[in-house]
Amino acid sequence: MSTPTTFWRIAGMSYTQYVTRAATAVRNGLKEPAKTKALQHETFSYNAASWEAGKIGPKKQVNKLTNAGISV
Amino acid sequence: MMQRALLRRFTPSLRRTFSTVEESAAAGMTLNFNLPHESIYVGAKVDQVIVPGVAGEYGVTADHVPLVAQLKPGVLQILHQGTAEAEKYFVAGGFSITHPNSTTDISCPEAVKIDDIDSASVTAAFEAAKSAFSSAEAGSQAAAEAQIDMEVNKAMAFAVGVSLA
């Protein structure tokens, strides 16, 4: 890309990172019960499983990729 | 002589293909307003949408020039057909694309009702972000995140009538 002009680009963030951070800020500024409902929109988790001899092992739910042993 | 006669026969039909201003205004514009988790409006016929673009707020009616705009954290106003009072949403960002056929697509990561904004929590978050920004290293990720929080909370406070600096 050419010379970054926005403060978030200069700091090394992508547009997606910038806008999801802004969305989080909006959700945190709400009254209950709208706040709890909105915060559910941003929660996510992964299922991690190991493969051995062509067979999938048991699935484990992890909320961060680093907890599954995957380096990000 | 022959050519002039042909022209006279064809120009009336050309004149008839232009629609009048009243016709297109009455037809209204179509709005598609989508969030990742919810479709708020799909194919809705509205009178006007006031969009908070980063370069400024602008209004879109039927036959607006095609436009792609990045949205800033701010208030999106939808004027439904036959109403004087706009329906307002606070949007976190996103994009608004107006097509040549009077359809506008607005996509935002989050949009909330103004009534759901808690002015006390927004003021507190703004003050916290302000101190985080002043203590963070200039140009770092932490400084950028604090700046985003400041910008968004300031806009949310403004939407509920509180002016922060």
Image (cartoon, rainbow, N blue to C red):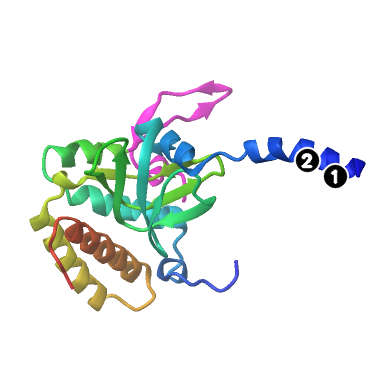
Neighbour tally class for label 1: few under 14, some 14-19, many 20 plus, Cα within 10 Å: few
Task: Give SS at disc 1.
Answer: helix
Tell me where the magenta segment starts and ends, as one range: A44-72
**What chain is tagged by disc 2?**
B
The image quadrant of residue B82 is: top left
Along the viewing direction, whichever of B163 and B5 lies nearer the viewer: B5
Task: Give the quarter of the figure containing the N terminus of chain A.
Answer: bottom right
Along the viewing direction, whichever of B83 and B162 lies nearer the viewer: B83
Q: Residue at x 42, y 65 (%)?
A: B55
Residue A65 x %, y %: 41, 43
Does the segment drawn in magenta span residue A70?
yes
Number of on-image labels: 2
- In the rendered image, the vertical position of residue B32 relative to residue A30, given as above or below: above
Task: Give SS at disc 2.
Answer: helix
**Residue wearing tag 1:** B4
Q: Residue at x 44, y 52 (%)?
A: A16
Q: What residue type is labelled 1?
A: Arg
Q: Are marks 1 and 2 in contact (CB under 8 Å)?
A: yes
Along the viewing direction, whichever of B101 and B84 lies nearer the viewer: B84
Neighbour tally class for label 2: few under 14, some 14-19, many 20 plus, Cα within 10 Å: few
Q: Residue B8 carries which label?
A: 2
Q: In this view, does A32 lie to the left or right of B69?
A: left
